[in-house]
Every structure is written in C-alpha cells, then in structure tokens.
Amino acid sequence: MTNHTGLFNFDDVRILNLTDSDHARWDAYVMQQPAATFFHRAGWQTVLTQSFNHPTYFLYAELNGAICGILPLAHIRSHLFGNSLISTPFCVYGGAIADNESIATQLEQSACQLAERLKVDYLELRHSQRRHPDWLCKDQLYVTFRKRIESDPEQNLLAIPRKQRAMVRKGIAAGLVSHVNSDVKQVYRVYAESVRNLGTPVFSLRYFQTLKTVFGDACEALTIHHGSQIIAGVLNFYFRDQVLPYYGGGTTQARAMKANDFMYWEVMRRACESGYRVFDYGRSKRNTGSYDFKCNWGFEPEPLSYEYYLVQSRQLPDINPLNPKYRLFIRVWKQLPLPVSQFLGPFLSRSLG
C-alpha cells in the first residue's frame, strides 16, 4: 500500500504506512508518548488483519528518519453496517498521537484524503477530547471509566462504595477463586454465553487467540472458579502502569454468586499487587447496565468524543444496540442456542468495529 516515497508528503514530513519491519519503531514511539494508549500499539495491525481480514492503514509521520507521529486506521466494508475508516475499530481509544499539533494535523489530513480515496461513508476518530469543533461528534453516547488505585489491596477494597463492596465480599464468602490461564478458550466460553444472553453477536475464538499471540503477557486470561466449575472470565490488557479488563462475562450461575463483582475485584487486587496504578474500566454507553455497574464502583464517567469526517454519508452512523431498529434482532439473538450464536456471531461481529 505504500513505499518509502510516502503516501503523503508535507514539506519535510513524510506520511508512511506501517510495515512489519517497522513495528518495533512504532511501539518504541508509542511507549514514549504520554497520550498514547494500548490501542495505539502496532500489534493491532496484525490483529485486525489476521482476525478480520480488514485492510489497515497505520499511518506514521517521519522527519529526518525518525517517527514523529502515528495514526492507526482500518477499513471496514459491510453490506449491513456500511463502509468506514476508523481509528481504531474494536478499540475504545484512537486518533493521532504526535510530537506537535502540526504533525497531528498532517496525519489527520492524510486520513481525510485516504477516506476520500477509498470512498468510505465516513472517517471516525476515537478521541477522549474534542479536536475538530467543525466535525460531527458523538460525545453523549460513550463514556470511559478510569481511576488510580493504591498499592495496598485493603485500601482499594475500602475505596469501593459500601453496597458494591458488599457484593465483592459475598463472592469471597461463596468460596470463589481466580486463576490466570495461558489459554483463552475458557474465558471465551463464558464470554460467548454472556454476550449471547445480551443479544450481541460474539467474536470468533480466533480473535481472542490472536490477541493473546500478538500481545503475549500484555494480554491475560483470568477465570473465576466455584469448585471445579468456571463461572466467569475476563480478558485483560496491560499497558505501562494500567490494567484494562476488556472482554468479560459470566454464566447464568455467576449472578447469584456475585462472580462478576468478585472477578473485577480480583483483577484490581492482582494488578495493584503487581505494581499497576491505573484501573481502566473501559467504555460503556450512558444509561445502560454496564454504565450503572461501573458507577457503583465509585468510578466517575468521562465522556468520549468520537469525531466524524463525512465522505459519502450525510449523517452520523447509528450502529449500536440502543438503536430501535435492532430491537427485534436482539430479541431473536438472545433465543439462539449457544453453538448457533458462536457459529453465526463472528460473521456479523467482524463488521461491528
């Protein structure tokens, strides 16, 4: 998709497309940039390509042979859900990270030109704060939840509001225990059941396996056991001093035993004991069950600003379960046998970036 003459050129700055040989350079840049996130890592190019076969355009700015800015993008084409260029699909955060505002702007201009060239419906940049007041923006739909945690587990437990802390203690009293696994299959099994029950198409097992292969120790599978039975599980990401519980769920038995409450406490406890200091609870839609659940932990919602540069489309996309036109689909999906939902789900979820 590119060569070293660059996709785009701005005076002395060249905009290039990431190749396998430059992954280490890209990640070294990510690690030194305070605003970068786990979702800016080069490994997402591999994950998006191998798991979903989506074309990627991981743009980086180069000046005098050194990377000075990055903007990961992927192209999703779907007959059902439209044609989009996103930074970054299946991720909470995205957008340009650069040495200065000028370079960030050049990367974004390159993304707009690429969106025009690909004739997508829209370009979507997933920012935590507004960058383009003249672009359309969704800043009232999604929030994220982040909080600093202490090194002492007992302090973190006491920081949880009383009613929610009682749920954690009930899980402890029920004899639940957590285990870290090298194989993601057990987490995937309970996650697949959980999202089917919510009426959501599940990802493929291959996606989970690719995440683990690509990110290694930075991707952790944690399961919750009641005796010999696994009743909950979560796939966690680690980045710098942060832990991000990302794909989690539980079986029908989990609710009665407060296994989900116990599970997220175990993620926090293990993380703080290992030296991590930020707990990133991830994205939720306002006024949903997961939103209320995270607020009950004492986390303050922080609005996310997803900005849109329209190309072929003339209105904002509305691809989310709260859209009334998806109600019948959700109701039917909840009734599917689990093996059927696991077979059909990946064909749909690959386009729900």
Image: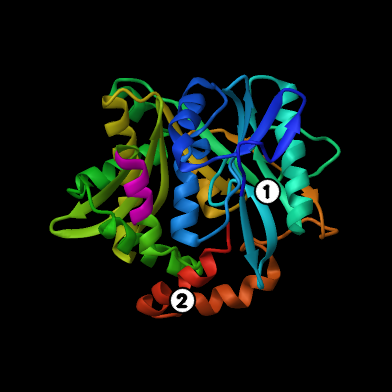
Callout 2 amino acid = Leu
* Residue 346 left/right relative to 131: left
Residue assigned mark 1? 141
- Front one among 121 and 54: 54
Q: Look at the numbered disc 1 and give the secondary structure of its residue.
A: loop
Q: Nearer the viewer, residue 318 or 77?
A: 77
Residue at x-position 63% and y-position 46%: 142
Mark 1 belongs to which amino acid?
A: Leu
Residue 293 appears anywhere in the view: no
Determine if residue 347 is in view: yes
Say which of 246 and 81 sits in front.
Answer: 81
Q: Residue at x 32, y 20 (%)?
A: 151
Q: Quadrant of the C terminus?
A: bottom right
Q: Which residues make up the magenta segment? A: 209-216
* Separation of marks 1 and 2 at Cα, in angstroms: 27 Å
Q: Position of residue 316 (x, y in %)?
A: 78, 55
> Circle 2 — which element?
helix
Q: Residue at x 83, y 35 (%)?
A: 133
Q: Is residue 290 left or right of residue 1?
A: left
Tell whether position 213 is magenta: yes
Side (left or right) of 306 relative to 288: right
Please, what is the dominant secondary structure of the magenta stretch? helix
The local crowd at label 1, few if under 14, some if 14 to 19, many if 20 or more residues have their Cα within 10 Å, is some
Find disc 2 in the rendering and name its residue. 344
